[in-house]
Image (cartoon, grey):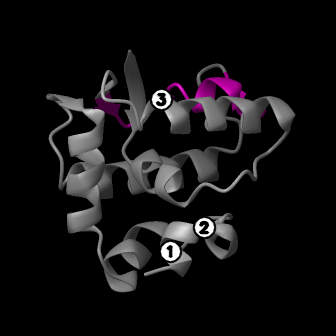
């Protein structure tokens, strides 16, 4: 199975604990989170809407309906993508191991996630 994921969603998935915008979003995020833990899953990275975004109620015409938020999201993606090559299709398990090594402190994650609305519920951030 191949997943398309935004850069910042690599961090979101590590901290996901069942919260989301609505039931459809949570079900999709849960599915993607399970797939990324499979040995059979590969991941292609992007800084545009991905397999998680497709269930987001805020996605309109393939961008976040809030243009300021859309700009912030792309910025978060690009900060993560500075550390991983978006031209490579990754083995999911190896990619998430790499992400754990790169983003291993609150300082490294805060540089990306400081404006995130899910910051206070993110287990990844809270456990650093």
Mark 1 lies on a secondary structure that is helix
Q: Is residue 117 magenta?
A: no
**Residue shown at 41%/67% (left/top)?**
112
> Does residue 90 appear anywhere in the picture?
yes
Q: Which residues are magenta?
A: 44-60
Q: Position of residue 108 (x, y in %)?
A: 31, 77
Residue 91 in the image: x percent, y percent?
22, 31
Q: Nearer the viewer, mark 1 or mark 3?
A: 3
In the depicted structure, whether residue 18 falls above or below residue 15:
above
Q: In this rendering, would 94 be left or right of 54? A: left
Residue at horizontal 24 percent and vertical 44 percent from the top: 95
Mark 1–mark 2 CB contact (< 8 Å): yes
50, 121: nearer the viewer: 121
Toward the viewer: 67 or 95? Answer: 95
The picture quadrant where one finds residue 56 is top right
Q: SS at mark 2?
A: loop
**Closer to viewer: mark 3 or mark 2:** 3
**Residue at the disc numbered 3:** 35
Distance of label 1 from label 3 (alpha carbons)? 21 Å
* Residue placed under numbered mark 2 in the picture: 122
């Amino acid at each position: 199975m191949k997943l398309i994921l935004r850069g910042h969603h690599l961090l979101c998935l590590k901290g996901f604990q069942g919260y989301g915008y609505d039931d459809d979003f949570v079900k999709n995020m849960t599915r993607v989170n399970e797939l990324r833990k499979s040995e059979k899953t590969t991941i292609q990275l992007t800084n545009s809407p991905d397999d998680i975004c497709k269930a987001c109620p805020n996605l309109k015409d393939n961008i976040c309906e809030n243009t300021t938020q859309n700009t912030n999201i792309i910025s978060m993606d690009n900060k993560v993508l500075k550390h991983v090559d978006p031209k490579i299709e990754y083995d999911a398990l190896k990619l998430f191991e790499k992400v754990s090594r790169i983003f291993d402190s609150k300082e490294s994650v805060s540089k990306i996630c400081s404006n995130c609305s899910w910051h206070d519920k993110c287990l990844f951030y809270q456990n650093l």
